[in-house]
Image (cartoon, rainbow, N blue to C red):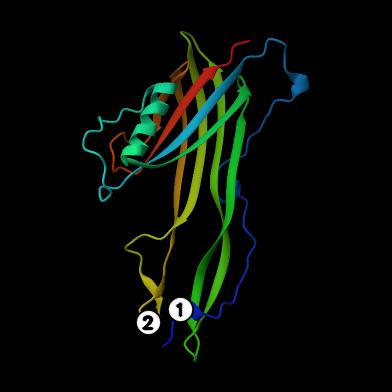
Amino acid sequence: MRSLLTLSVALVLLPAAPLAAQLQTPAATGIAKVENLADDQAFFDVEVAIVQWASSKEESKPDVPKPKLEGPREEVAARIAELQKAGQITGVQRVRLQMPEQRPGLVQIGLDQPRVTGAQLTPRGGTVNSIRYQSTGTLVEVVPRAMADSRIAVQLDLARSGIITPPEAPTFVESEAGGGLKADTTRTLTVRTIAVVNDGHTVVVSGSQQPDDGEIVLLSARKIAK
């Protein structure tokens, strides 16, 4: 019986493009140097969170209150933890950094992931795969600016990419044992905006606050006391 567990694999390794280039997100420019900072330079603490809602097929507790992911940063964090425990949120990725006013801060979290780009059955029933490494991950760039009435404007550039295999993905190579290789796809999220948030608060900048509606992007900012 032929099985995909005994495959012969041929790797075709191609260089992975930098995440910033692949996602077509501009790299930060104008990063402040320490020697150029004034003694009274204002600094900000900014956090970006990408929240993944659970699908409707996943169970959640019926007594969980309707989610509202805006308000004071600490309250929103506690609410997210409660929704995770109840199963309404399946994952949260947080990026937090500090930077001077009107200067960009940049965080890049990346991984080179292998993906099968082609497969061919051999006369003996094995499979020869062509594999390419693709750069995936998250890139976040923020630029804060103080405004009147304790508000903070934040310019946000976010790009996220990952490889997934949807349940409905077709199988492009099958074995007599019933197994197979399913086609995967690249899932991306891009946000470019300017958001205004009250000092120490969190706002929704992208997505819906209703469960079973994909991903939601949250932004919080706080001016650091001198």
Q: In which quarter of the image is the N terminus?
A: bottom left
Q: Residue at x 60, y 73 (%)?
A: 11
Task: Judge from the rendering whether residue 94 lies leftward or rightward of residue 39; answer left or right.
Answer: left
Q: Is residue 108 visible?
A: yes
The residue lying at 29 percent from left, 30 percent from top is 67
Q: Which quadrant holds the C terminus?
A: top right
Amino acid on which disc 2 is placed: Ala
Answer few, some or many: residues within 10 Å of disc 2's Cα (few below 14, many 20 plus, some between 14 and 19): few
Secondary structure found at label 2: loop
Q: In this view, does 198 lie above or below 60?
A: above
Q: Tag 1 or tag 2, which sits nearer the N-term?
A: 1
The residue drawn where x is 42% and y is 67% is: 183
Answer with the quarter of the image where residue 91 lies: top left
* Residue 220 spot, x, y in % from top left: 47, 25
Residue placed under numbered mark 2 in the picture? 177
- Residue found at the very far top of the displayed protein: 149
x then y, percent, for residue 170: 35, 69
Q: Cβ–Cβ below 8 Å for labels 2 and 1? A: yes
Q: Which amino acid does label 1 sit on?
A: Leu
Give percent across and percent down for residue 132: 57, 66
Q: In this view, does 204 lie to the left or right of 39?
A: left
The residue carrying pointer 1 sits among few (fewer than 14), some (14 to 19) or many (20 or more) residues within 10 Å by Cα, namely: some
Q: Quarter of the image holding residue 90?
A: top left
Give the x, y percent position of residue 79.
36, 28
What residue is at 21 percent from the left and 37 percent from the top? 62
Distance Cα–Cα, label 2 vs label 1: 8 Å
Q: Between residues 173 and 67, which one lies in front from this camera angle?
A: 67
- Report helix, strand or loop for mark 1: helix
Q: In which quarter of the image is residue 96?
A: top right
**Residue 4 circle label:** 1
Q: In this view, does 17 lie above or below 10?
A: above
